[in-house]
Image: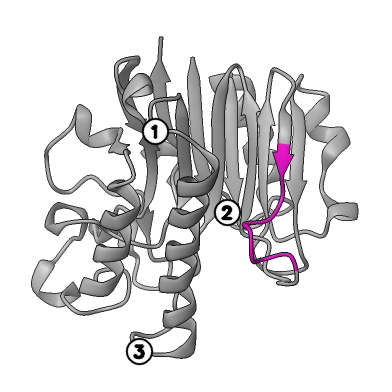
């Protein structure tokens, strides 16, 4: 079973790449972030022709999340509790193949110390509270997406340069660890301990070409899924070529 997270950075711009990738890789579940499309503009018909069912929630130009799956999704939730009146579409959850799937696009935070930064930390806190009140860590649960946090020194291309900066500040890393402490494991780190494994490279600095990346896209799983996880693979090739997203797909492989 393959469960994938991918920040596509505009589903309409990236649609040809997405459809081609689906055909080649045939994931069971694909969680997308930054779809950047209102629901009426989501390319539902094009994706359904590939055999995938879709649940999604989006907005114009920013944010937006979707889950594509071979199997039907049940118990769909399209907003993190407390977000009902928030126009930022960053959360979608459902039960698929007896696994609770939660797909998130955590706020970027803009600048350390800013109001948006505090919103990011509060968003993490509310996500943890949602887990506390809604689920049991003994059950199979997977949270994936663009977390906009590099958890430790191995996840940034230059520790000295990134220390204290957005995505790698101590409060952000603490918020991520607090989420993990609910009962989650970093699926990639179950199998790969090396530094230099990245999922995002900045367009503006030719980050991909220069190897200047961050690992900010994660698959977090409870113990019952950890025992079923045989590997996690980052598709660096999808960051190449014409009009790529600045993020690569991350695939968890499960029995």
Which residue is at 65% across, 34% downward? 94
Question: CA–CA distance between discs 1 and 3?
Answer: 32 Å
Q: Residue 131 location, x and y as percent?
A: 48, 46
Labelled pair 2, 1 in contact (Cβ < 8 Å): no
Query: In this rendering, is residue 251 above or below 211?
Result: above
Q: Which mark is residue 19?
A: none
- Where are the magenta residues, as a range? 76-84
Q: Secondary structure at mark 3?
A: loop
Name the residue at the top extreme: 255
Q: Is label 2 or label 3 in front?
A: 3
Disc 2 designates what residue?
Answer: 243
Label 1 crowd (10 A; few <14 / some 14-19 / many >=20): some
Of badges 1 and 3, the one in the foreground is 1
- Work out which residue is located at the far bottom of the displayed protein and give it: 114
The Cα atoms of the two marked residues, 2 and 1, are separated by 39 Å
Residue placed under numbered mark 1 in the picture: 137
Q: Is residue 223 left or right of residue 4?
A: left
Question: Furthest-front residue in view?
Answer: 133
Q: Is residue 35 above or below residue 122?
A: above
Q: Is residue 246 visible?
A: no
Residue ID for mark 3: 113
Q: Is residue 224 visible?
A: yes
Please tell me whether mark 2 or mark 1 is closer to you in this view: 1
Image quarter of residue 83? bottom right
Q: Residues within 10 Å of mark 3 (few under 14, many from 20)?
A: few
């Amino acid at each position: 079973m393959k469960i994938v997270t991918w920040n596509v950075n505009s589903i309409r711009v990236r649609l040809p790449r997405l459809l081609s990738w689906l055909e080649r890789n045939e994931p069971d579940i694909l969680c997308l972030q930054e779809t950047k499309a209102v629901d009426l503009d989501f390319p539902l018909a094009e994706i359904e022709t590939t055999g995938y069912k879709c649940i999604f929630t989006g907005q114009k130009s920013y944010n937006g999340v979707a889950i594509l799956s071979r199997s039907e999704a049940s118990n769909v939730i399209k907003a993190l509790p407390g977000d009902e009146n928030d126009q930022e579409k960053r959360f979608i959850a459902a039960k698929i193949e007896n696994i609770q799937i939660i797909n998130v696009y955590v706020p970027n935070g803009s600048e350390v110390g800013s109001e948006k930064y505090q919103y990011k930390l509060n968003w993490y806190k509310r996500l943890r509270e949602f887990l506390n009140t809604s689920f049991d860590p003994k059950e199979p649960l997977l949270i994936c997406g663009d977390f906009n946090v590099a958890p430790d020194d191995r996840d940034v291309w230059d520790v000295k340069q990134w220390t204290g900066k957005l995505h790698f500040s101590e409060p952000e890393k603490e918020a991520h660890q607090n989420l993990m402490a609910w009962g989650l494991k970093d699926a990639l780190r179950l199998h790969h301990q090396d530094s230099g494994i990245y999922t995002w490279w900045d367009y503006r600095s030719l980050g991909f070409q220069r190897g200047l990346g961050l690992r900010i896209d994660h698959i977090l799983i409870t113990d019952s899924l950890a025992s079923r996880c045989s590997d996690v693979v980052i598709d660096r090739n999808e960051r190449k070529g014409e009009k790529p997203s600045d993020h690569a797909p991350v695939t968890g492989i499960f029995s």
